[in-house]
Image (cartoon, coloured by chain):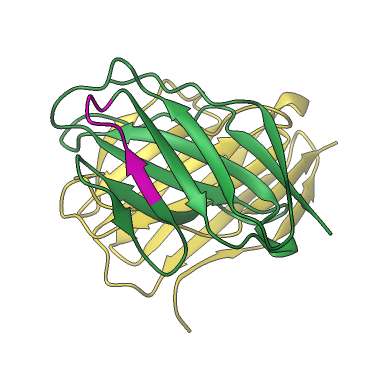
Chain colours: A green, B yellow
Amino acid sequence: DAKTTQPPSMDCAEGRAANLPCNHSTISGNEYVYWYRQIHSQGPQYIIHGLKNNETNEMASLIITEDRKSSTLILPHATLRDTAVYYCIGSSGGSYIPTFGRGTSLIVHP
Amino acid sequence: ETGVTQTPRHLVMGMTNKKSLKCEQHLGHNAMYWYKQSAKKPLELMFVYSLEERVENNSVPSRFSPECPNSSHLFLHLHTLQPEDSALYLCASSPGPGAFSNQPQHFGDGTRLSIL
C-alpha cells in the first residue's frame, strides 16, 4: 500500500490555478491515485482518480509523473469555495484499504 | 433524494445512554463504510460492509455495533461510550460489489457526536 505525503497547507489567490502536490514513491503498479476534498463541516467529496495517464474532469486535472512516484492536482481557476482539505490516497481495490492521511489544507484568498 | 444521507446531524449523549446513527444511500451501491474523524486526526476506517456482509472491522471497541439490514441502510449502535468517542462519524458507499474495488467512495456529511 502506498504511503502518500502532502504539504500540510497551501494558499492560492482567487482566480489563479491551485497546484497541489502529492508524493507516493512506494505506489505499486496497480494502485490508482485518488483525490478527495473535505470542506469544513461536510463529508469528503471525490474529485478525480488516475492510474498512469493524466486525467481531467469538470472539477480538476490530475497530472501523474511518468514514474508514478508523484502527482499534482490542478484546480485551474480556484474560487473561495475551493477552500478545503485535499486528500491524496492510493487504492488498488481488492482487500486493500485506502488510508486517508492529514491532507493539504488549501486556503483560497480574495 | 439522492446521495448519502446521515441522521442525526448532531447528537449529544451521556456515557450511559444508548443511541443509533443511521446512514441511507440512494445510489444503488453495494458497499458501505463507517469512518471516525476525531479533531485534527485523519479519517479512521471502522467498519466495511459488502453486499450486507461485514468484511472489515478495524479493531473497533465493542461499544460500537454496526448493522447493515440491506444494501441501502447502515446503522451504528452506540452504548456506554467514552468522552474520547466524541467525533464526526462519517458513512460512505461505493458501487461494489466488492469493498473499495477501485471505485470512488461517496460520503455523507456525518453525525457530530458529543459525549458528556
A48 to A91, vertically: above or below: below
Please state the horizontal and vertical placement of residue B95, each as a whole percent of the image.
24, 60
Q: Residue at x 85, y 36 (%)?
A: B116
Image quarter of residue A27: top left
Q: Residue at x 39, y 63 (%)?
A: B73
Q: How far from the left and from the top, in percent, is residue B17? A: 72, 42
Residue occupying image coordinates x 72% and y 29%: B40
Magenta range: A62-68
Identify the residue shown where x is 26% and y is 44%.
Answer: B100
Rendering quarter of residue B88: top right
Q: Nearer the viewer, residue B11 or B26?
A: B26
Rendered image quadrant of residue A60: bottom left
Q: Is residue B48 visible?
A: yes
In the picture provided, is B53 more to the left or to the right than B1? left
For the question of whether residue B105 can be seen, the reply is: no
* Image position, residue A75 (x, y; %): 54, 55
Q: Position of residue A45 (x, y in %)?
A: 50, 56
Residue situated in front as seen by the camera: A44 or B76: A44
Q: Is residue B16 left or right of residue B92?
A: right
Q: Is A65 in the magenta?
A: yes
